[in-house]
Image (tube, rainbow, N blue to C red):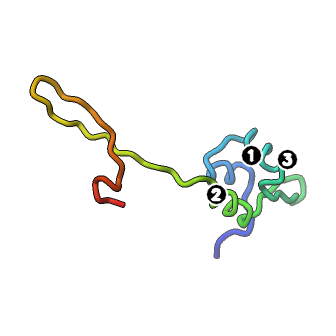
Amino acid sequence: MAPLAYTVADACDLIACGRTKLYELIATGRLDARKEGRSTVITAESLQAYCMARPKAEICVPVMAARATRRAGRVVTLAELGLE
């Protein structure tokens, strides 16, 4: 069974941010935090909603193209490589 809430440290690891950014997200209402005694926990549901609301990343793969006198690098998308 998946956890219903995460500690601040675990939530930071899950969404790849620091404590300051996490507390900023809580203060602005983008994450739902609860108190468990003296500890602050962030609901798994709000973490998932925050991650899903982020824009989708466009990932580019660097490709080196050979030229007559030198190698020139260019960036192609995954779609161009047929990987998307």
Kind of residue indicated by mark 2: Cys
Q: Residue at x 11, y 23 (%)?
A: 69
CA–CA distance between discs 1 and 3? 9 Å
Q: Earlier in the sequence, mark 1 or mark 3?
A: 1
Identify the residue position indicated by label 1 in the image: 22
Location of residue 68 with respect to 63 vertically, above or below: above
Q: Residue at x 85, y 47 (%)?
A: 27
Q: Position of residue 1 (x, y in %)?
A: 64, 76
Label 3 CA crowd tier, 10 Å (few <14, some 14–19, many 20+): few
Identify the residue position indicated by label 2 in the image: 51
Q: Quadrant of residue 64?
A: top left
Residue 27 numbered mark, or none: 3
Whether residues under marks 3 and 2 lie with C-beta atoms below 8 angstroms apart, the answer is no
CA–CA distance between discs 3 and 2? 17 Å
Kind of residue indicated by mark 3: Ala
Q: How many marks?
A: 3
Q: Is residue 32 left or right of residue 65?
A: right
